[in-house]
Image (cartoon, helix red, strand yellow):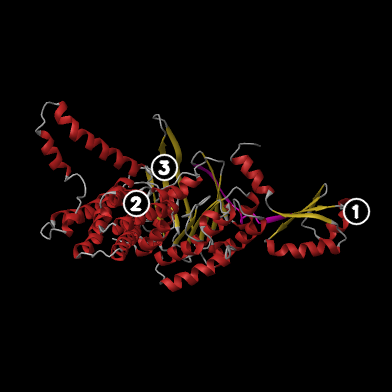
Amino acid sequence: MISWPVARAAAREKLRSPAILVVGACFVSAAALGGRAGAPGDTFGGFGVAFLLVLTLALGAGLLSDELDSGHAQLVLLRPLTRAAWLGGRLAGAGVALAAVTAAAWAAAAVASLGSGHALPLSALALLPLAVLWAFAWLSVLTALGAILPGWTNAGALVVAAIAWATLRTTLPALLGHPEWAAAAAELSKYLGPQDPLGLAFDRHALGPALYDACWVFFAWLVAALLFNRRELARRRP
Amino acid sequence: MTGALPALEAAGLRKVYRARGGGQVVAVDGLSFAVRPGEVVGLLGPNGAGKTTAMQLALALLEPDAGEVRLFGRDPELLEVRRRVGYAPDAPLFPRRLTGLQILALHGELLGFRRVAARDRAERFAEQVGVAEPARRPAGTYSRGQAQRLGLALALLGDPDLVLLDEPTAGLDPAGVAAMRELLVSLRGRGAAVLLNSHLLSEVERVCDRVLFIKEGRLLRTHDVRAGGRRAEVRLANAVQVSARLAEKIPGGALEGDRFRVPVASEDVVPALVRELVASGAEILEVRLGGAELEQLYLQIVEGRA
């Protein structure tokens, strides 16, 4: 399911990317500022969550196509390795990079919070794995899209789809003269992508979103593998 | 050798690309060929003849519209078959931020070597193809020739029994071309099968056992390079003065203008021939082995020139 040599190479590659380093630095700074204000729980809220999303998009954009377009994926896939394991390796590698940057942001928030004389509540400890799980589920969706879309259009397609749905669900019910549909659309929104499980840190009974996100990771990988297995791999000459 | 199971066998391959706008391009059309262990086979043809497509079909990187490929008599997609195959594409690109050694070590691990063994192997193969120093830098900084050499190291990393090389000398300096030639000879020496796509006719003639002439995706003709023996062509500064002595000392040769042409069994006998010529008083300006024949054949078969 996962090729660990591929995962290590992908993580190394992503953690050396200037774009990832810049977004990561912003994320860590925002988290540290939140921590100084005494709100380590805000590491993944407000600006923090915005940087987490941007980081996820930056990691997922071209996760597969960068390798395919260069022709290196073709060389790797000529080795005794299944396409699903390669996909799993790329996803896991990007996930490791995501976890590393997110952990740095969380640590910055925690240190800043303690340094400013604030207490670090136990619930803050749960934030890190939950935030990583949520972002990783979105990363899996980006990977599935990347199995069929060229270049960085997987990230573009996801952003456009999210904006389009957000616009439709708020405007369409009113336009169609059925404002009562807005509540149903809002409820439906919860199931159109991974759910934010951070509430779990404060409410131990809300396991649903976390499990739901774990399912998204598995099914997105499965869909990616099915789609990718149908692709021809030959690269056009540069 | 001819009785051995082919390392690569393609039968009736056909591949049609769908162009934008609804058009179709027939890249490979009914192509059949085989490469046996210990044999170096060259693919020759003009640009767009379908040589690269044929290689990609052979590796199952492309799905054929018709026909079948077998590697070592088996499905090319089988993982144990892939372990025995090496491929160096034309103008390879690599992850820009990984070093050559990291890329080689990654492939070593994928081939089943442990991490430490894969790292050692990476260093050895980087040195073997002449990129020991650049391999410590990120691949994004490589020149075309360095990337080509790294691609070659990747192709050879698993000691493959079948090697497919697509324009391996493109971007290489003369020393690199010579090293490539030695490498092909050593691959043949250890019984590997090689399919070589190159436009360097002189190199193809020097190292290949057979040449497949391809045009518009079709196999026009197979030429057995070794069957007719080889020929050394020596340009002389004093051809007229030494003609009688050459006719006496080297009776198999023929003098045409300032060129003395002699059939030779292999390139190994060329140094002895040169010594014999010098001893006969000949002043040598240039020595060529083959090349001209294949060029003529290429022009005749592929370009249709008389």
Q: Main secondary structure of the magenta part?
A: strand
> Does residue B19 appear left or right of residue B200 in this picture?
left
The 10 Å Cα crowd at callout 2, few under 14, some 14 to 19, many 20 or more, is many
Percent x, y of residue A98:
33, 57
Percent x, y of residue A221:
26, 53
Residue at the spot of label 3: B14
Question: Does residue B88 lie above or below B31 as drawn?
Answer: below
Residue at the spot of label 1: B241
Question: Does residue B113 lie above or below A236 as drawn?
Answer: below
Give me the C-alpha separation between circle 1 and circle 2: 80 Å
Percent x, y of residue B68:
38, 49
Most distant residue in the front direction: A117
Pair 3/2: label in front: 2
Q: Nearer the viewer, residue B290 or A121?
A: A121
Q: Nearer the viewer, residue B18 or B242?
A: B18
Percent x, y of residue B166:
52, 51
- Secondary structure at numbered mark 1: helix
Q: What range is drawn magenta here?
A: B218-232
- Disc on res. B197: none
- Secondary structure at numbered mark 2: helix
Instruction: Tell me if label 1 and label 3 are in contact, CB under 8 Å.
Output: no
Pair 1/2: label in front: 2
The picture quadrant where one finds residue B180 is bottom right
Q: Residue at x 22, y 62 (%)?
A: A124
The 10 Å Cα crowd at callout 3, few under 14, some 14 to 19, many 20 or more, is many
Give me the C-alpha separation between circle 3 and circle 2: 45 Å
Q: Are marks 1 and 3 on the same chain?
A: yes
Q: Are marks 3 and 2 on the same chain?
A: no
Q: Is residue A127 visible?
A: yes
- Which quadrant of the figure contains the N terminus of chain A? bottom left
**Amino acid on which disc 3 is placed:** Arg
